[in-house]
Image (spheres, helix red, strand yellow):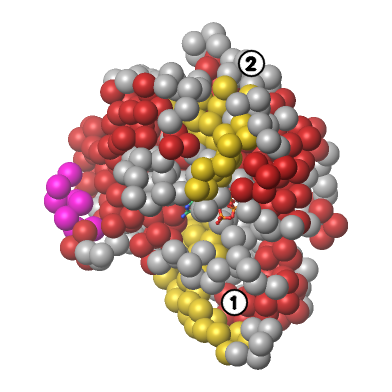
C-alpha cells in the first residue's frame, strides 16, 4: 500500500485532500488487491487515481461597478468506465485542484454504488457567489460556460450543483449552453422543473442520507423516531436532512454556516425550517438571524482559536455533517461519542478526518460515509438524465420511491461487501470495496485506455 500511496503523493505533493481520499480507499481495497492479483497487474490503482482529463481555464467577467474580474475554472473528468462523467460544480473561494480531485475521486465510487450508469467527475471555480448580485452571478456563469460547453454534453459529461451552485446558477449556465450549442438537452442536472428538471432533485441528497441512516438503524431494530440530531450547514443538503428527519419523527437541534451555528433545544419544526429556507435560498442571509427571530435558540460564532467545533458538543443520538470537508476532527468525534451519538450520516463529502473515522470505527457506531450516505443526490441526477432521454416526467412519489430503493440497495451493497471481506459493520470498507469492484471490473473489460 505504501508504494501505491507514494506513487500518488510523489506526483502531486501539495494535493493533501486528494491524498486523504486516496488513502482511505486504498486501506479498504488492499484485501481486494491481495485476493485478485489481476487488478495489480492491470495497474488499476495507478490508472484510477489519474484523471482521464483535467481542464483548467480563465473565467473573466465584469462586476456591477464595471471592474474586470478574473477567476479560475476547472473540470476534472476522472473516470468514464461505467458511464458519462457525472458530478457537481462547486463555486467557493477555497476551491483548488486538490479539493476538486478528491471530490472527483470520491464521485467515481459513489456513482458506481448508485447502480446507475454514471462515471465520475467534478468541477468548479474559486468564484464566491456570496455577496454578489444576481447580475454578477449571471455574468460569471455565462463566462464559465463559454469555455465549459466545449467539454460537456449529455453523453459525455453532465455536471450538477454543489456548494455555491444551486438552481439559480444551474439556470444561468444552462441558458448559456443552450445559446452556444443551439440545443435543448439534458447537459446539466438540478434544472428547474419547467425546463427539464426532476421532482425530488433538490431534496435528494438530504432525504437520501436520512434514508440511509434509517436503514443502518433498522439493522439494530431501531428507527429515527424520537432521535435528537445535530446537523451542520444550512444549505441544500442540511435543509432537506432536517425536513426528512422531521418526517420520520426525529428532532434536529442545530444548523450552521461559515460564520457560526444555532442550537435550538426545542427542535427545528416545519415553520422554523420554512424560515431557514426563505432566509438561505431567497434572502441569502446568515444563520444568526434564526436566533434573532426565535429566542429559544442560542447562536455561537465560530471561534477559530478552538481545536474543536462546539456544534458537535451537544447531547444527541445522530449527527449529520452537511457543510464541508474535514469539519469533524478527532476531538469532535470523541465529543460526539461522549455525548451519546451512535449514528453518523455524512451528507457532506469527506466531512470526517481520518482520526475521526478511526474513532467512529473503533467505537462501532453506525457510521455512514459520504460516498454511500450522500449518493442520493447524484442518484436522482441520474434519474433526471433518464427522464430527459425519455422526454417524460415522473411524479414526486415515483422519484421518491426510486430514491428510497436506491438507498436501500446501496446500504445492502455495503453490508454484503464488508461481510465478504470479513469487516461486517464497517460501512467505509463496504462502500469502497463495492464501488471499486464495479469500476475495476469495467476497466479490465475495456482494456488499457
Ligand atoms: P450549499 O452551498 O447549499 O450549502 C453549504 C453550507 O455549508 C452552507 O451553509 C455554508 O455556509 C456551509 N459551508 C460551506 N463551506 C463551509 C466552510 N468552509 N466552513 C463552514 N461552513 C461551510 O451546499 P450543499 O448543501 O449543496 O453542499 C454541502 C455539502 O454536501 C458539500 O460537502 C457537498 O459536496 C455535499 N454534497 C452535496 C450534494 C448536492 O446534491 N448538493 C450531493 C452530495 C454531496 P456559508 O453559506 O456561510 O458558506
Kindly tell me whether residue 94 is visible in this rendering: yes
Q: Is residue 6 covered in magenta?
A: yes
Q: Nearer the viewer, residue 91 or 131?
A: 131
Residue 202 shown left or right of residue 130 in the figure:
right
* Crowdedness near tag 2: few (<14), some (14–19) or many (≥20) residues, C-alpha within 10 Å: some
Prevailing SS of the magenta stretch: helix
**Residue identifier under label 2:** 225
Q: Nearer the viewer, residue 95 or 1?
A: 95
**Numbered range of the magenta stretch:** 1-8
Kindly tell me whether residue 412 is visible in this rendering: no
What x and y, as percent, mark residue 88?
56, 57
Q: Quadrant of residue 377?
A: top right
The quadrant in which the C terminus is found is: bottom left
Dot 2 lies on which element? loop
Q: Nearer the viewer, residue 74 or 438?
A: 74
Residue 49 shown left or right of residue 269 in the figure:
left
**Which residue appears at 58% of the width and 37% of the height?**
298
What x and y, as percent, mark residue 72?
48, 77
**Residue identifier under label 1:** 144
Amino acid at each position: 500500500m505504501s508504494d501505491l500511496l507514494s506513487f500518488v503523493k510523489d506526483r502531486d505533493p501539495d494535493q493533501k485532500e486528494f491524498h486523504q481520499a486516496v488513502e482511505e480507499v486504498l486501506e479498504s481495497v488492499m484485501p481486494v488487491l491481495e485476493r485478485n492479483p489481476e487488478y495489480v497487474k492491470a495497474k488499476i490503482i495507478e490508472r484510477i487515481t489519474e484523471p482521464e482529463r483535467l481542464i483548467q481555464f480563465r473565467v473573466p467577467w465584469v462586476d456591477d461597478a464595471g471592474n474586470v474580474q478574473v477567476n479560475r475554472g476547472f473540470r476534472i473528468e476522472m473516470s468514464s468506465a461505467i458511464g458519462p462523467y457525472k458530478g457537481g460544480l462547486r463555486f467557493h473561494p477555497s476551491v483548488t485542484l486538490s479539493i476538486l480531485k478528491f471530490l472527483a475521486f470520491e464521485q467515481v465510487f459513489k456513482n458506481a454504488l448508485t447502480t446507475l450508469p454514471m462515471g465520475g467527475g467534478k468541477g468548479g471555480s474559486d468564484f464566491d457567489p456570496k455577496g454578489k448580485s444576481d447580475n454578477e452571478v449571471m455574468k460569471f456563469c455565462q463566462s464559465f460556460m463559454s469555455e465549459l460547453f466545449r467539454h460537456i454534453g449529455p453523453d459525455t459529461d453532465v455536471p450538477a450543483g454543489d456548494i455555491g451552485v444551486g438552481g439559480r446558477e444551474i439556470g444561468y449556465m444552462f441558458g448559456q449552453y443552450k445559446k452556444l450549442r443551439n440545443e435543448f438537452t439534458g447537459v446539466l442536472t438540478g434544472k428547474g422543473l419547467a425546463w427539464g428538471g426532476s421532482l425530488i432533485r433538490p431534496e435528494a441528497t438530504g432525504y437520501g442520507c436520512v434514508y440511509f441512516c434509517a436503514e443502518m438503524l433498522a439493522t439494530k431494530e431501531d428507527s429515527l423516531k424520537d432521535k435528537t440530531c445535530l446537523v451542520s450547514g444550512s444549505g441544500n443538503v442540511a435543509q432537506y436532512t432536517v425536513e426528512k428527519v422531521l418526517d420520520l419523527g426525529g428532532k434536529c437541534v442545530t444548523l450552521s454556516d461559515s460564520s457560526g451555528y444555532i442550537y435550538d433545544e426545542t427542535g427545528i419544526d416545519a415553520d422554523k425550517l420554512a424560515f431557514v429556507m426563505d432566509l438561505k435560498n431567497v434572502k441569502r442571509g446568515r444563520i444568526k438571524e434564526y436566533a434573532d427571530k426565535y429566542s429559544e435558540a442560542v447562536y455561537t460564532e465560530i471561534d477559530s482559536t478552538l481545536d474543536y467545533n462546539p456544534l458537535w458538543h451537544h447531547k444527541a443520538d445522530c449527527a449529520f455533517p452537511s457543510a464541508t470537508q474535514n469539519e469533524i476532527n478527532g476531538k469532535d468525534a470523541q465529543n460526539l461519542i461522549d455525548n451519546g451519538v451512535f449514528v453518523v450520516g455524512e451528507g457532506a463529502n469527506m466531512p470526517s478526518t481520518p482520526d475521526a473515522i478511526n474513532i467512529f470505527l473503533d467505537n462501532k457506531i453506525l457510521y455512514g460515509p459520504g460516498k454511500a450516505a450522500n449518493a442520493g443526490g447524484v442518484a436522482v441526477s441520474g434519474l433526471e438524465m433518464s427522464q430527459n432521454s425519455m422526454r417524460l416526467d415522473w411524479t414526486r412519489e415515483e422519484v421518491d420511491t426510486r430514491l428510497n430503493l436506491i438507498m436501500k440497495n446501496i446500504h445492502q451493497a455495503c453490508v454484503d461487501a464488508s461481510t465478504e471481506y470479513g469487516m461486517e459493520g464497517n460501512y467505509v470498507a463496504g462502500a469502497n470495496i463495492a464501488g471499486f469492484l464495479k469500476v475495476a471490473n469495467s476497466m479490465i473489460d475495456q482494456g488499457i485506455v
